C-alpha cells in the first residue's frame, strides 16, 4: 500500500514536469510564430512604402483649352506626393515598418519575463492595425477615383494615361493590406495568450 502511494506521488510529480515542458514548448512555438509575423509585417510594409514611394510616371497629355484651338501636348507626371492620401499611405507604412523592427527587438527582450512591456507591445500592435487599415482605405479610395473617375464632380479617370503608376499603387495597397493582416494576427495571438494565462 505504501509503495502504491509512493508510485502515485512520483507519477503526479511527473505530470507536473510534463505540464511545465508543455508550457515551455507552447511559449517557444508562440514566440517563433510571433517573430515570423513581425518579420513578415516589416517586409510587407517596407515593400509597400518603397513600391509607391519610388513610383513615378511621365506621359504626354493633350489639353484642349478652347474648342476653336488645336490641342496642346504637355508633359504630365504622376508622383505619390501629389496626392495627400498617398503621402499618408507611404508615411503610415514607414511608421509601421519601423515599429515592426523595433517591436521585434522588444519582443525578444521581453520573452520569458512577466513585465508590462508585453501589454504595451499588444496596444502598439493594435494601433498599427488601425493606422494601416486607415491608410489603406484612404489610398484605395483615391485609387478607385483614378481607375473609374467621378462623373458627378467631373473628375476624369487617369489610370488609362498613368497605367504603370496606378498598377504600382494597387500593388502597394495589396502589400500594405497583407502587412496589416500580419499585425492583426499578432493581436489575435496576444489575446489568445492572455486568455490561456487567465485560465
Image (spheres, grey):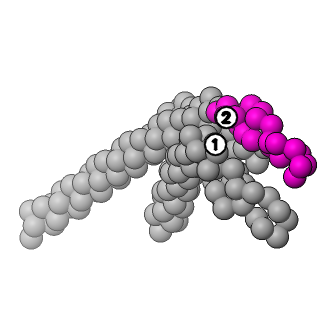
Marking on residue 59: 2
Residue, x 72% and y 39% (percent of image)?
61
Q: Secondary structure at mark 2?
A: strand
Residue, x 48% and y 62% (percent of image)?
192
The stretch in magenta equals 57-81
Q: Where is mark 1, residue-wise?
A: 162
Q: Nearer the viewer, mark 2 or mark 1?
A: 2
Q: Position of residue 143 (x, y in %)?
A: 67, 54
Q: Secondary structure at mark 1?
A: loop
Q: Is residue 162 above or below residue 140?
A: above
Question: Does the segment drawn in magenta span residue 90?
Answer: no
In-image side of 24 versus 100 (left or right)? left
Question: Does the segment drawn in magenta span residue 76?
Answer: yes
Residue, x 58% and y 45% (percent of image)?
163
Q: Is residue 115 visible?
A: no
Q: Nearer the viewer, residue 12 or 123?
A: 123
Mark 2, Cα crowd under 10 Å, few <14 / some 14-19 / many 20+, is: few
In-image side of 30 versus 25 (left or right)? right
Amino acid at each position: 500500500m505504501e509503495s502504491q502511494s509512493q508510485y502515485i506521488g512520483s507519477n503526479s510529480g511527473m505530470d507536473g514536469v510534463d505540464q511545465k515542458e508543455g508550457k515551455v514548448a507552447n511559449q517557444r512555438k508562440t514566440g517563433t510564430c510571433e517573430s515570423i509575423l513581425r518579420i513578415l509585417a516589416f517586409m510587407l510594409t517596407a515593400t509597400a512604402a518603397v513600391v509607391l514611394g519610388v513610383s513615378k510616371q511621365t506621359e504626354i497629355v493633350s489639353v484642349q483649352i478652347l474648342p476653336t484651338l488645336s490641342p496642346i501636348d504637355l508633359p504630365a507626371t504622376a508622383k505619390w506626393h501629389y496626392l495627400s492620401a498617398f503621402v499618408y499611405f507611404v508615411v503610415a507604412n514607414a511608421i509601421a515598418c519601423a515599429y515592426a523592427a523595433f517591436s521585434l527587438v522588444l519582443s525578444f527582450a521581453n520573452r520569458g519575463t512577466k513585465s508590462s512591456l508585453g501589454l504595451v507591445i499588444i496596444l502598439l500592435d493594435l494601433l498599427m492595425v488601425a493606422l494601416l487599415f486607415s491608410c489603406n482605405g484612404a489610398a484605395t479610395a483615391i485609387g478607385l477615383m483614378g481607375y473609374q473617375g467621378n462623373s458627378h464632380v467631373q473628375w476624369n479617370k487617369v489610370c488609362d494615361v498613368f497605367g504603370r503608376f496606378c498598377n504600382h499603387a494597387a500593388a502597394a495597397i495589396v502589400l500594405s493590406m497583407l502587412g496589416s493582416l500580419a499585425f492583426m494576427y499578432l493581436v489575435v495571438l496576444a489575446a489568445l495568450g492572455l486568455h490561456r494565462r487567465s485560465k
